[in-house]
Amino acid sequence: MPFLELDVLNNPNNAILGIDLGTTNSVAAIWQDGRPTVLRPPGQNDGRIPSVLHFPEDGGIVVGRNARALATESPESSLFSVKRLMGRGLEDVRTDLDGIPFEGSETDSGLLQLEIRGKKYSPQELSARILHHVWQVAGAALGELAPLRAVITVPAYFDDAQRQATRDAARLAGLEVARIVNEPTAASLAYGLDQKNDGTVAVYDLGGGTFDVSILSIEEGVFRVLSTSGDTHLGGDDIDQTLVELALSELAGKADEATLADPAFRQGIRLSAEKCKIELSSRPESELHVVAPEHGIAWRRTIRRAELEERIAPLIQRTLDACRRAMADAKLQPSDIDEVVLVGGSTRVPAVRSQVQEFFGREPHTALDPDEVVALGAAVQGHVLSGGTRDMLLLDVTPLSLGIETMGGAVSKVIDRNSPIPTQVTEGYTTYADNQTGIDFNIVQGERELARDCRSLGTMKLSGIPPLPAGMARVAVRFSLDADGVLNVTAKEESTGTEASIDLAPMHGLTDPEVEQMLLDSYDHAQEDFDASRLANLRIEIGTMSRAVSSHLASAIGLDRDTVLDIEEAVAAAEKSATTSDVAAVQAARDELERATLPLAAALMDSVAKRALEGKTLDQV
Amino acid sequence: MEHQHAPGEECPKCWAKVSTPLFCESCKAILPATANPSPFDALGVEPSYPIDAMALRKRLLTLSRQLHPDFHIHADTGTRALAERNTAELNAAFEILSDDFRRADWIVKSLAGPSESDERQMPSEFLAEVMEWNETVEDARDAPADSPARAELDPLATSLEEQRARVMSEISDRLVPLPEAHAPVLREVRRRLNAVRYIDRTLGEIAELRLADASSER
């Protein structure tokens, strides 16, 4: 009997988007014309979409580039690095919250929430905003509605709660998750497409907030992960933090304590620390500025590259520790590695590159853009999942051991770390008392021997066991990790064949009914939210355009008086309109301003900068 | 109990002989999952203690290319669940067969040999030896990285590796050819497997100490 493959190749409705949901930036990509392509916002060369949220005073949420632009002037209403909060409880993220200008709290079920302008948001809802924006940008790049199915990447070292939180964020954004793929594994797909050589590859992925290392064997198109290790709390943010701490310690005598502890003030320092770090990757020294006129602070300090390298040495050391563990788990020596692939913006730091090179004893492969390679790999996996090819297959592993707490608080391992997924293990349990109808399990993830040192995934209540004398019930509990690395548990009482039911309350997560309720709520407020966000974006665009006009109008050559007057009028009208809340009127004023400034943009392009400015509109100057 | 499509049986869909209860390579049908198939059956290889690691890996890759849920995402819910379930069985089977210890352990269990706890009693000379290892490891743990106590770890690790290889080869001798179910030799194998557990625990502790050393060396 012949095997009929579904003809999905020519059906664009089956296309699957690849999304790298990053701590600092997110990137969307899709398979197009035989290769993965990054979906760049129209008119942009940069495919990175800042994972930044901005909350304007009068409502709405601004996401992405506009939010990033606003964050510099108003850090007190901007939010960075939401990814660090995903699937975590309040206690886990105390230090992260020090740099976040919003109050954190926890619900009774352990769900983290941030209070922003009087409303409480879970990290899942905030990430959903980012995902929705990324989807919109993808649509703008494609010139049509982007696919609603997506492959979303997560750090390989993400635990069950963090994976579930990501899956829920996608659902809240209205996306169907075709597969959760580990970032380094996705990167290896893009690498494999590029190289087409069999061999053993180490992927070193240092992103904005997370670090992963994965060792893979590539054999005839099968990408098999041998081991993975990492740290979900180690990345570029921590490099920035070393400079923030330097600034805070040197500012200690110059500013009062309340200022130094002010999260908005700290966020401002962090932005300038990030800029300084990036400059130090291409220059031997750079300046760290902290300018806060409202606090009477204008501080500058020259930072040498060597100084930064000394401060981040312990961070790089932690990444190499994880590399050693991954190599040991794969039972390999650095000399067994055929290629080292660098992923993540933080691998641009020269000290990171040189130490990785020293560790593996070979020059890393740098032909791929470290910011885009994960999204490209996600698009390749999207292509595989949409039925486009059977030439490639990812066989991934689970990063953490899964166990249950036994009497006395020890952990009985059920699934070992680095087991290939999907996988399953069936364990037998029995009752301790006559007519006992339920058993409680604490399911944990981690490598430590005591349950309290591991991360609890929540307590599982097994009920519906038929009443039998103690020790007579034979309950077979099946623990399975699906291809996304997410745990499912089922149970059956074997002597009677009764299906026991499992109720697993997620730790720091959302239950299915909660996700559904949130989706319903968001439909109710969709128009309101949409208008508020659109208004906020229009105001930002008007602001950007009028600033550009004021800085370029005087110097523009060859504009006649009428044109200048026309521009000035349009600026005044748009700025006035921006103070109102009539979305249609503000949109019209913004469009009018754009039209009026076209001659100015053309005049600027005629000037010296012509070549550099080609293909850009005024607001991108 | 559901009917098992063991190797050599017919596919319920096309009647071809199947090589694994998970999948019919002839008509590409994913077969209804059977509870806990033998890992040898799952991968479709002859039950035997010695194993060709390369051939086993090729079987895993070949079957994964057919069964993996990534290739069945457009199928009906039932088929998708089956693909996920059977791939989980395949992966779990590969993990058992690709590891000498786990493979021997599975064989002893499947032949109704004694369990780990049935043979908990270890000879006193062996336990005395284990206590010596533990002492060496504990002394090294408390000592600074480049001390003589730490240097003791290297010869200990080498001797444990050798001992492990020797015991594993004794196990192999007893499992070739495969014994009958309930055979007394299974008890000898179980005792040796328990000894390997002790060796592996100590080797694991040494590996952890070495990782910690490498980390603090800089």
Image (cartoon, rainbow, N blue to C red):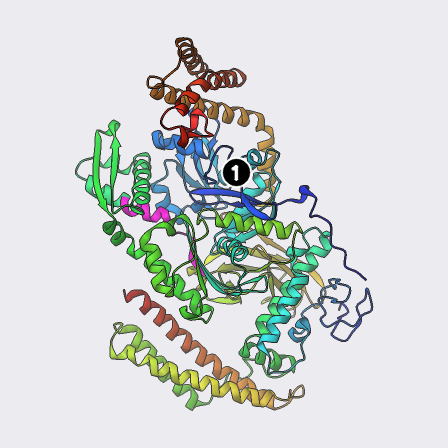
Q: Which image quadrant for residue A501?
A: bottom right
What percent of the width, then of the height, locates residue A218? 54, 64
Magenta stretch in the rendered image: A229-243
Against A332, is A6 above or below? above
Q: Is residue A611 left or right of residue B53?
A: left
Q: Which residue corresponds to the image point at 33% horizontal and 42% vertical from the top-left?
A: A274
Chain label for disc 1: A
Any magenta on residue B162? no
Query: Quarter of the image containing the N terminus of chain A?
Result: bottom right
Q: Which residue corresponds to the image point at 58% horizontal and 51% vertical from the top-left?
A: A380
Nearest the viewer among B165 and B27 is B27
Dot 1 amino acid type: Val
What percent of the width, then of the height, locates residue A148? 62, 40
Q: Which residue corresponds to the image point at 41% horizontal and 60% vertical from the top-left?
A: A453
Q: Kindly tell me whether residue A476 is visible in this rendering.
A: no
What percent of the width, then of the height, locates residue B106? 60, 78
Q: How many marks can you see? A: 1
Q: Is residue A222 left or right of residue B207?
A: right
Query: Quarter of the image containing the C terminus of chain A?
Result: top left
Nearest the viewer among A615 and A621 is A615
Any magenta on residue A231? yes
- The residue to which callout 1 is attached is A134
Q: Kindly tell me whether residue A392 is visible in this rendering.
A: yes
Against B128, is A344 above or below? above
What percent of the width, then of the height, locates residue A536? 46, 25
Q: Which residue corresponds to the image point at 77% horizontal and 69% vertical from the top-left?
A: B3
Q: Is residue B82 left or right of residue B99?
A: right
Q: Which image quadrant for residue A563?
A: top left
Against B132, is B78 above or below? above
Neighbor class of circle 1 (other Cα within 10 Å; few <14, some 14-19, many 20+) is many
Q: Secondary structure at mark 1?
A: helix
